């Protein structure tokens, strides 16, 4: 996935990208959208809301979000600090937050499962 999609898309989005890289990134992004499109449910606002004589009837309930901030437990903090100092991170981290999360998941599975 990284070689076929992520790298070309990120390269194409870079502000110093050449026209060719931009075109390649755009083409690869379109291919990815086309592949995943059947698996995503998309609705237009007009499909969700009906306008009837100044009344708005929603077909879906309103989305509610709750954000709760928690401190790491002692064990979680130790795990996180060990992760940041690990050879795995230092050798594999490429600046991508997604890559860092993937490495963290692998680290947790390897060391604690």
Image (cartoon, helix red, strand yellow):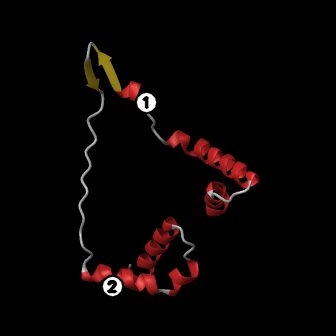
| Left or right position of 57 against 23 | left
- Secondary structure state at the residue bearing disc 1: loop
Q: Describe residue 63's horizontal placement relative to residue 108 as left or right.
A: left
Q: Residue pushed farthest right?
A: 20
* Residue at the farthest top position: 53
Quadrant (top left, top right, bottom left, bottom right) of the C terminus = bottom left
Residue at figure coordinates x 69%, y 57% from the top left: 17
Q: Which residue is mark 1?
A: 44
State the image coordinates of residue 31 (x, y, percent, origin top left): 65, 45
Q: Which mark is residue 78?
A: 2
How many angstroms separate mark 2 from mark 1 (CA)? 46 Å
Residue 65 drawn above or below residue 61? below
Mark 2: few/some/many CA within 10 Å (<14, 14-19, 20+):
few
Task: Measuring from the top left, give residue 27's x and y in whole percent.
Answer: 69, 46
Q: Using the image as rendered, state which of residue 21 and residue 4 is in the foreground.
A: 21
x and y percent of residue 94 in the render? Answer: 57, 73
In this picture, is 79 found above or below 15?
below
């Amino acid at each position: 996935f990284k070689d076929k999609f992520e790298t070309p898309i990120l390269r194409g989005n870079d502000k110093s990208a050449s026209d060719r890289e931009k075109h390649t990134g755009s083409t690869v992004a379109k291919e990815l959208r086309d592949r995943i499109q059947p698996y995503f449910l998309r609705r237009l606002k007009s499909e969700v809301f009906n306008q009837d004589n100044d009344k708005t009837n929603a077909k879906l309930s309103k989305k509610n979000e709750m954000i709760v901030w928690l401190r790491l437990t002692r064990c979680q903090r130790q795990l996180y600090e060990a992760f940041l100092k690990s050879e795995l991170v230092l050798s594999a981290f490429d600046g991508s937050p997604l890559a860092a999360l993937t490495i963290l998941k692998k680290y947790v599975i390897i060391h604690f499962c």
